[in-house]
Image (tube, rainbow, N blue to C red):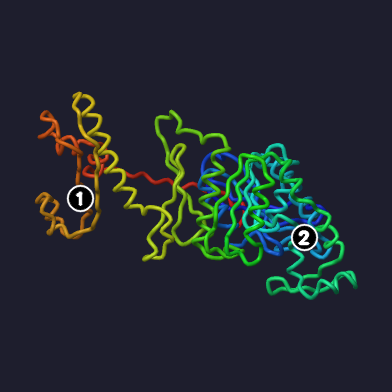
Amino acid sequence: MTSTSIKAQFKGHSGASLAARLDIPAGSVRAYALFAHCFTCSKDILAAKRISAELSRAGIAVLRFDFTGLGASEGEFASTNFSSNIADLQSAVGYLRDNYEAPSILIGHSLGGAAVLAAAGDVPEVKAVATIGAPADVAHVIHNFGSKLDEVEESGEALVQLGGRPFTIRKQFLDDVRDTVLADRISSMRKALLVLHSPVDQTVGIENAGAIFGAAKHPKSFVSLDNADHLVTRADDAAFAASIIASWASRYLRADKPQGDEAVEAVRVSETGEGKFQNTVHAGRHRLFADEPSSVGGLDSGPSPYDYLSVALAACTSMTLRMYANFKKADLGRITVDVSHAKIHATDCAECTDDDQAKGGKIDRFERTIMIEGAVPEPLQDKIEEIADKCPVHRTLESSAKVVTKVANVSASGG
């Protein structure tokens, strides 16, 4: 299984087909999460995509979907309300439960956050709930209707501009949100809770975060999204929220599976679809990003391929020296290794052999600096460089390793 985003669909509360995407991590899946978007938004807003990508990197698959009548989903938005949103959420839970695994995590943005708070207590498999800019009172959404509110009350419906788009709002929507007491749902859900909110949120004030936090039972946490707007439209804010949720949620999930005992252990690297170069790296229970610097068009979300190569040499050097010192029962201080990489002309390489220089062209040059705290024990003083040169990665880099490439066909599973 590769790290990918596949299209999905399932029936919502009214029987209309709801459009969804399931972001699946590389390697084994630790858990499934469900993301509920903000009022009149869609599953493809920046915050949803970034959070899904970050959770995927942590081994968590994320289903994000469009509520009835929004985004690419079927149905009539005017006939929906907060209760129908909860019903759509339950349909999404059922889809995951029937086809994959019930979600362990619910994540909701704005009114979607209120929806996951209301629904969490009815999903026994859920262990943790995270909200972003969520209102403590569902009726808070009514203030978005402005002068049209009276028309809805008197005529039964009105065309309201929300986010620059027209939506028909009916009186049944007002009645439904006014009848919902969210505080009771929060206090009784008994799930781990993470509340993320911006203190400068102009749409849903920071006091809502305090009310949600106060209504919830422990364990509960609050993280401020300093200077973020309500929709978390800036990439840096979305990335921060995503990293916090991924790190926090991992506490409530089963541990990632360790690398097996097979003779050949594989590292899996897969494109995320974010940016030009971002890839997930899955090595045993460890999940990382590989990327390129922003100066060459990357997101700078992880080390570059040559950074990883330098890391391999530095780590191998440190470990080899430590193993030798332990074998000799020598009291060697803490080891630090710096490695830099550059491509230089072979004729400029003072350390290269005559054969290397005779080849001409450019070669890869790794410069390694070994630092050891305190005095180096007498038995090791003349051995540090010699032992470092025996590190397996060093030997691999200086020998002629063979790379064997195989091309495997992968069936398309959605766009």
State which quarter of the image contains the C terminus.
bottom right
Q: Quadrant of the N terminus?
A: top right
Give the image quarter of residue 154: bottom right
**In the image shown, does 94 or 413 lie closer to the viewer?**
94
Name the quadrant containing residue 129.
Answer: top right
Q: Is 168 situated above or below 251?
A: below
- Looking at the picture, how far across and down is residue 148, in whole percent? 80, 74
Q: Measuring 20% from the left and 32% from the top, which residue is drawn there?
A: 332
Instruction: Give the x, y percent position of residue 128.
Output: 63, 42
Q: Is residue 403 depicted above or below 49 in this figure?
A: above
Question: What is the number of the mark on residue 356?
Answer: none
One can see residue 83 in this view: yes
Element at label 1? strand
Q: Which residue is mark 1?
A: 367
Number of other residues with Cα within 10 Å of mark 1, as a class: few under 14, some 14 to 19, many 20 or more = few
N-terminal label among 2 and 1? 2
Q: State the residue position of label 2.
A: 139
Q: Single out the residue that lies furthest toward the right.
A: 155
The amino acid marked with disc number 1 is Glu
Which tag is nearer the camera, tag 2 or tag 1?
2
Within 10 Å of disc 2 (Cα), the crowding (few <14, some 14-19, many 20+) is many
